[in-house]
Image (cartoon, rainbow, N blue to C red):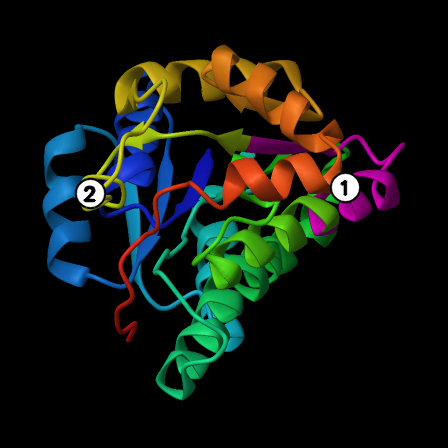
Amino acid sequence: MVFITGASSGIGAALARYYASHGAILGLAARRSEALQALAAELGTVCHCYPLDVSDAAALATAGADFLARAGVPDVVIANAGVSVGTLTGEAEDLPAFRRVFEINVLGMVHTFHPFVAAMQRARRGRLVGIASVAGVRGLPGAGAYSASKAAAIAYLESLRVELQGSGIKVVTLAPGYIATPMTEKNPYPMPFLMPVDKAVASMARHIERGSRFAVMPWQMGIVAAAMKFLPRALYDRLASRAGRKPRGTLR
């Protein structure tokens, strides 16, 4: 059994297709009800659909309880829902976007895991998987909300991993680079090592099965991320100032 948020498109939909092809019973959560139902109809496996916003803790608690009652304790829970938009701290109209990005990318992850932790602890098994990003390794210009939210997600997942050590639950942090999805197709700048979503998901599934603590895909971006982490700040500032910037926009 696998429960996935942000399941209606992109990485979430590709993960749903992957696990459906392996016969898993799925719990699929996303805001877009019609897209969610259309995906479930094509998968050919048992799907329980939950149209919801991950920023709504009560909605996820209800969905989690329903999935536990209908399908049992999941083997894997994937907190995949996420949003990205360019933001500038000096622009007052961007402040709601900062809040919204954190509500979805960070609190949404907490809301996703919360309904399942106690049941998984009793069963002494399972995987809690958070989709972070290499953008959380160092701050990117014009992406303060997104970079900070993914850095927070990485730190939260590390805290949770240590907290649950010895419980039988594995906490897996996945940090994709550029993956070919609707989220990245709007980026108006070069995306090194752009990875097809199906190939990325196959890599993710391998790491989930192994219970990897932290993994970056593709592997080339993992090398870049490691190098970025240890660059002196002055050098990083010079290099990052030349990076492309995601367009600003409105999040609902």
Look at the image and say whether residue 165 sits in the magenta stretch: yes
| Residue with the mark numbered 1 | 158
Of 29 and 242, nearer the camera is 242
Q: Which residues are magenta?
A: 156-174
Q: Please tell me which of labels 1 and 2 falls first in the chain.
A: 1
Of 36 and 139, nearer the camera is 139
Count of numbered marks: 2
Q: Residue at x 35, y 50 (%)?
A: 245
Residue 128 vertical position relative to residue 99 in the rendered view, above or below: above
Label 1 amino acid? Glu
- Where is residue 150 drawn, in percent x and y? 57, 50
**Helix, strand or loop under label 2:** loop
Label 2 amino acid? Pro
| Residue with the mark numbered 2 | 182
- Say whether residue 86 is left or right of residue 161: left
**Which mark is in front, 1 or 2?**
2
Tell me if I can see residue 75 in this picture.
no
Of 217 and 47, nearer the camera is 217
Look at the image and say whether residue 217 sits in the magenta stretch: no
- Where is residue 63 drawn, in percent x and y? 44, 62
Q: CA distance from mark 1 to mark 2?
A: 28 Å
Q: Residue at x 13, y 52 (%)?
A: 35
Q: Quadrant of the C terminus?
A: bottom left
Label 1 crowd bin: few (<14), some (14–19), many (20+), radius 10 Å: some
